[in-house]
Amino acid sequence: MLGDRILAFIYNLVQNLKHQIPALKILSVNLLLLSEASKQDNLSNFFSTTDRQSESPNLHTDESPDELDQKNGEADPDEEVEDSRKGIIYARVSSDKQRKRDSEGIERGSIQGQIEEMEDIADREDIKLPYDPITDEAKTGTNFDRDGIQTVFEKAKQPDISYLLVEKVDRIGRTAPETLYFIYILQSECDVTLLTSGGEQDVSQAEGLLHTTLMSLMAEIQNNLRTTKAKKERIRGFLRNKNWKCASPKIPLGYNETDDGWLEVDPVEKEVVRDLFQKFVQCEMYTETERYIDDKYGPQILDGHVIKTLLQNWVYIGQPRVPEEWLIETTYTNDLVEPDLNLLTEDMESEINVSEEIFYQAQEIISDISQQSSTDDDTDGLLDFIEEFSLFAVVEGTEPATLLHNCGEPMVKDGQVDLKGRTVHRYRCRHCEESKEAKEYYRQWPREHELDSIQLIQQILDGDTSLFDASK
């Protein structure tokens, strides 16, 4: 019964993919324009292809076919076949750990090992290799922000390339949807077929699509298993071996790193932490607390630390923790107790009069702020505009929704403003806040003219001919 269920699932997956891939092409381009933070936007370059025929040197010519025959001679059928069987090799490793030696002493998992294997296949299949192998070394396969894979696509646009040779499907990518999509675009847009050590992966045929889908899903599952294993090793390193860097690369404010990788109290920064909690409980505002600490101790004291993140760190009451979501489906618990790391105990020698209770007060305030934001926040964000209008209208009618300030730094939400009867977010550039006037570092999205553009584009998409009625 299990086998039947698996086969039924695979069959349905294939049918859905065959119907959905053409539509996904348009959707993915627009979605990728909005995902700068994930760094997947380079996939949109995959659609900047020119018509393959337009690259042919003989497409736009005034010479007659007879004249071309006289100029070029009769086409040799064998030569045409040879020209059509050209390919490019792509190899990738994410780390040195992937290298494995076979019985002949060749590192098959290494870049060179992959290249040699693909060269053997190309020689056996009589595929010419006009370009040097393209590689990505020490690059993760979980995204396509890689120079090598981008170069692969640029080379694949050439009309004489028919094959992409890779050792395994997971060398292209380890996220199934993006990997499948990349392979589909290679074949449908560039007429380039994937060739692995397992043979051709023709996704235009059900068998090839099924096999490639399974390989992509297996690669993603394997990657998830490795990630889970690595996370468990980090948990164990933090909770059992007391290595702070296993949980976070940054040492929290108030501490120094010891020689064995754990924490010790910094007496100067300890006072800053006590003052930070006291101020936040008094004002109940992150921005005001941050401004207070910067003014009193200097902007360098926070050194990139986020106020909310600091306030939620249990190490300040001597209970260092890993994120709770890490512990899901594990046997580990956040059971570390380190009294020597408690910075919020009553201390007669400290000028800041606080106790451990202030930590719990801060957590209640943070919870209230979050709850208030989720229940009362009726502002229209990016997804609201996409749902009301369309992705195309939003992308074409506004500046990139990543909301970078004109200085190039990202902006953060900071309040709401009214826009033609609706409430939208206001954003602030923290980088420019101290050096510029408010009107220069604040930005709302969308602006009024952007909303007008979105509405106009959507009307056109909806076929509203009244826009062009001269009588109105």
Image: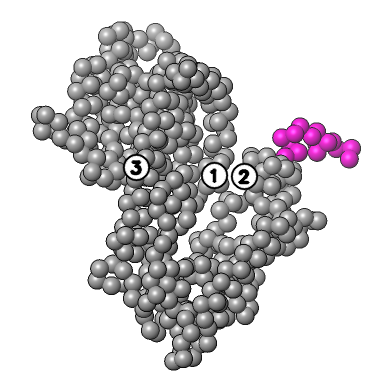
Circle nearer the N terminus (1, 3)? 1
* Residue drawn at the location 38% of the way across and 27% of the way down: 215
Q: Amino acid at mark 3?
A: Arg
Above or below, 152 relative to 258: above
Instruction: Determine the secondary structure under disc 3.
Output: helix
Kind of residue indicated by mark 2: Val
- Which mark sits nearer the N-terminus, 2 or 3? 3
Do the residues bearing badges 1 and 3 touch, measured as CB atoms within 8 Å? no
From the image, state whether disc 1 or disc 3 is nearer to you.
3
Say if mark 1 contacts mark 2, CB within 8 Å.
yes
To which residue does mark 1 refer?
Answer: 33
Q: Secondary structure at mark 1?
A: helix
Q: Residues within 10 Å of mark 1 (few under 14, many from 20)?
A: some
**Res. 226 mark:** 3
Mark 3 surroundings: few (<14), some (14-19) or many (≥20) residues within 10 A:
few
The magenta span reads 458-472
Q: CA distance from mark 2 to mark 3?
A: 36 Å
Task: Give x and y (percent) for residue 343.
Answer: 44, 78
Q: Amino acid at mark 1?
A: Leu
